[in-house]
């Protein structure tokens, strides 16, 4: 498929994938800081958990706003602004001397920076810039690039932390994020973007989406995706440390999730162009539930941790190109950044509760068992929510004419 792309579109593809790799890779590494930061400051784990929960919530709240600006002015300006906030917040987190500063830096600044400079903005840009015949493939490739970032950056972050300290590792991650504004220069939307439904006001599109049964079901299922991914990303290293698993194994297990999701995200994009996206989403959520349940029932060991990382990796971000594709299939791509931003807000509300409840329940029960089994139950609920979705295009008309 890549042979069909012109040289300018290939540059857009490569720079967009690099942004996705850096943005998602650094985001996946924050869980490495829970234990050393908490020990260094003498804080309970729920302090750091709340900061990352706040980060996810701010990311979700800012994503629709970033989407509106990207739909109106193009993704380049949004990515430039987000990269600066993201890098600055990550750097300031390294010198946070009290919980409030941690919440502001690692929570609010990084969260709002992510909302603008995330792989979600890249996916929206690809939806508008890429021709229809390669769009689903490009979405899958960008998702796979994010996973490549997780595979590479998490183990590198752990290696830097082991060789130096957690503060140096945070500065190194911030420096990598600082490349995003420069890469964003290539993502200028062409004058004639590949969009459907031109002429419909944004307010009409948003009103129709929020009142659409299938949009609500899709967003509700995506809440579960956020809950699961954020809980595992942030609390998995600490969970394994509690059971005597070497921190390096924890880092590599998260990296393995990213490695396998390179294939999972890419294949999901390819399959989404040929098969029902909502059926694929149903199967993915069911698969996640089975993988988590099997992991909890097996004796915990290095092989079981790595096997779980591999199994979960195939299903990790495979939901993203499919969910984005369903939004585009129903509403077209004119306001894809805004509408997918609203769906992603639901994802990030789930992320908030996944991270926060993980820390809160651990502090109250001394165990992660309850929250783990909650993720299994939620998988079944998400599968049930996605199954009845109808992927037929919705004709948008001004409210007065409807």
Image (tube, helix red, strand yellow):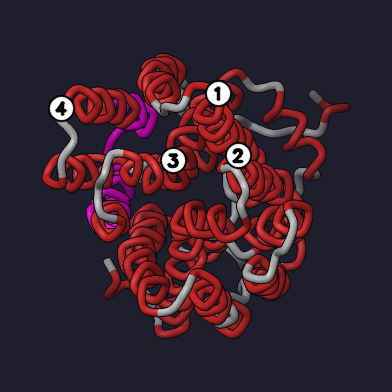
Residue lying furthest left in this view? 303
Give the structural element (helix, strand or loop) at label 3: helix
Q: Relative to 345, say whether 131 is above or below.
A: below
The answer to whether marks 3 and 2 mark residues whose Cβ atoms lie closer than 8 Å is no
Which region shows up in magenta?
254-283
Splitting the image into 4 quarters, where does residue 109 fall? Answer: bottom right
Residue 122 is situated, as x and y percent measured from the top left of the image, at: 53, 62
In the picture of the structure, the residue carrying the numbered disc 1 is: 364
**Quadrant in which the C terminus appears:** top right
Question: Which is nearer the N-term, disc 3 or disc 2?
Answer: 2
Question: Which is nearer the N-term, disc 2 or disc 4?
Answer: 2
Residue 321 is situated, as x and y percent measured from the top left of the image, at: 41, 47
Q: Relative to 183, say whether 377 is above or below.
A: above
Q: Which mark is residue 298?
A: 4
Q: Closest to the observer: 310 or 326? A: 310
Q: Tell me, yes or no, whether the highlighted magenta stretch contains residue 330.
A: no
Magenta residues, dominant SS class: helix
Q: Is residue 385 left or right of residue 243?
A: right
**Residue beneath the point at 50% across and 29% down:** 362
Q: Which mark is residue 255?
A: none
Residue 355 is situated, as x and y percent measured from the top left of the image, at: 54, 38
């Amino acid at each position: 498929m890549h042979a069909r792309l012109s040289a300018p579109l290939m540059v857009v593809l490569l720079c967009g994938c690099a942004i996705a790799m850096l943005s998602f890779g650094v985001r996946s590494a924050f869980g490495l800081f829970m234990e050393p930061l908490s020990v260094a400051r003498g804080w309970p784990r729920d302090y750091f958990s709340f900061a990352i929960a706040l980060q996810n919530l701010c990311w979700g709240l800012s994503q629709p706003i970033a989407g509106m600006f990207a739909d109106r002015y193009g993704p380049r300006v949004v990515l430039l602004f987000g990269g600066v906030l993201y890098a600055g917040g990550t750097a300031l987190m390294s010198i946070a001397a009290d919980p409030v500063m941690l919440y502001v830096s690692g929570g609010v600044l990084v969260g709002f920076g992510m909302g603008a400079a995330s792989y979600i903005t890249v996916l929206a840009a690809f939806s508008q810039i890429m021709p229809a015949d390669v769009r689903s493939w490009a979405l899958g490739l960008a998702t796979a690039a994010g996973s490549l970032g997780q595979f590479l950056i998490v183990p590198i972050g752990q290696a830097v932390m082991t060789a130096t300290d957690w503060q140096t590792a945070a500065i190194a991650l911030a420096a990598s994020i600082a490349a995003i504004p420069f890469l964003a220069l290539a993502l200028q939307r062409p004058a004639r973007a590949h969009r459907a439904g031109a002429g419909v006001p944004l307010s009409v599109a948003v009103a129709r989406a929020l009142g659409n049964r299938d949009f609500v079901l899709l967003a509700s299922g995506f809440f579960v995706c956020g809950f699961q991914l954020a809980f595992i990303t942030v609390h998995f290293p600490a969970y394994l440390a509690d059971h005597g698993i070497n921190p390096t194994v924890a880092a590599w297990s998260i990296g393995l999730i990213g490695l396998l999701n390179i294939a999972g995200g890419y294949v999901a994009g390819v399959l989404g162009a040929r098969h029902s996206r909502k059926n694929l989403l149903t199967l993915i959520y069911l698969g996640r539930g089975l993988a988590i349940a099997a992991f909890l029932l097996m004796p915990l060991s290095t092989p079981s941790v790595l096997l779980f990382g591999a199994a979960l990796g195939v299903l990790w971000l495979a939901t993203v190109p499919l969910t984005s594709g369903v939004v585009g299939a129903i509403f077209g791509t004119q306001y894809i950044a805004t509408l997918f931003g609203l769906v992603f807000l639901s994802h990030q509300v789930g992320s908030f509760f996944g991270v926060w409840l993980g820390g809160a329940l651990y502090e109250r029960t001394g165990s992660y068992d309850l929250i783990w089994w909650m993720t299994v139950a939620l998988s079944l609920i998400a599968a049930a929510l996605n199954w009845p979705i109808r992927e037929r295009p919705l004709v948008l008309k001004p409210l007065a004419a409807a």
